[in-house]
Image (spheres, rainbow, N blue to C red):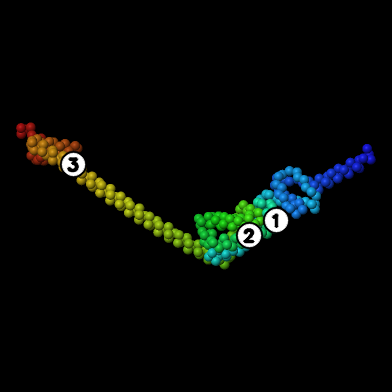
Amino acid sequence: MKSKIPTIIACLVAILFMFILCGYQLRISETVIATTLGKPKLVDQPGLHWKFPWPIQKITRYDNRKQLLKLNLRETVTNDNTNLIVELFCTWNIHEPLLFFNSVGNFFEAESILKSLIASERESVFRRHSMLDIVKLGKADETLSNIENELLAGVNQKSQSIYGIKIDFIGIAQINLHESNTQSIFDKMIQEQEKLAAEIQSEGTKNAKIIRDNANNQKAQKLAKAEAQAKRIRGDALIKAAEQYDKFNEDLEFAVFLRKLDALEETMKTKTTIILDPDTPPYDLLKYGQKK
């Protein structure tokens, strides 16, 4: 048995050596391109896999997780010829491993290509926007978001179709101004805000005039309607009064008597002392019984 121990150990070492040469473990966060005699093949199922030893087959591993790329500060120009110093960043991952393997090869080259693509797209995108839109109060966030979306769309179109790289997000880390341009930018911002304030004031004056005109029109319509209704009421009252006059004419003395009673009731509602000639109407009714 002692003489067989070295043989057993040698066999175990040989098996381990063969496993290292012919086997490999693929993690869930990885993708492998197995190149057999120059022909690449995608392997993307996690677990234990077997391969031919080098130089028959070569294994190239790629990380599938999202990668962060920061770009250095670069000067760019807006459409109103303002120089800006812009810093960008992006997150990306390998979208088509075979295309990435054939056109790029490794992550170092991928970052170099992305920097070039983003730098080129940055110049064209910022040329479509003005400095005032970028720093304008209430509009800056919207403009910066639009710039980021335009950068993403432009770079992704090239990176996916040519290099198999998908960019998930391109963001603006910071935007700086040259010291010589700062005061002129502030002056333009002040002028823009003053112009905006004048437009708002003009719009407010216009709306106030419209509101006043509408109110006057409604007032005139309501007054005309009320006047027409009052005329109808007066007309109806005159008609009814005429009917009563006809009845009063049947017994004029009795009608006068009733009106005098109404007058007495109206003038004597409160405690009042009045000194008058007893023949003054309607107080002459107080001596009506004596006359009778």
Q: Where in the figure is residue 201, as x and y percent of width and height?
A: 41, 58
Label 2: element kind: helix
Question: Residue 198: x, y in percent?
Answer: 43, 60
Using a 10 Å C-alpha cutoff, classify the residue at mark 2 as few (fewer than 14 neighbours), some (14 to 19) or many (20 or more).
some
> Which of these two is toward me, 56 or 138?
56
Q: CA distance from mark 3 to mark 1?
A: 101 Å
Q: Residue at x 55, y 56 (%)?
A: 146
Q: Amino acid at mark 2?
A: Leu
Residue 51 relative to residue 264: left or right = right
Q: CA distance from mark 1 to mark 2?
A: 18 Å
Res. 173 in view: no
For discs 3 and 1, the disc positioned in front in the rendered view: 1
State the mark number for residue 102: 1
Q: Mark on residue 117?
A: 2
Residue at 17 percent across and 41 percent down: it is 237
The front one of 128 and 50 is: 50
* Residue lying furthest right: 3
The secondary structure type at the circle numbered 3 is: helix
Percent across and percent down for residue 19 are 81, 45
Which residue is denoted by mark 3 in the rendering?
236
Q: Amino acid at mark 1?
A: Asn
Label located before the other in sequence (3 or 2): 2
Asked whether the viewer can see residue 138, the reply is yes
Amino acid type of the residue tagged 3 in the rendering: Asp
Please name whichever residue, 166 or 90, is drawn nearer the observer in this view of the structure: 166
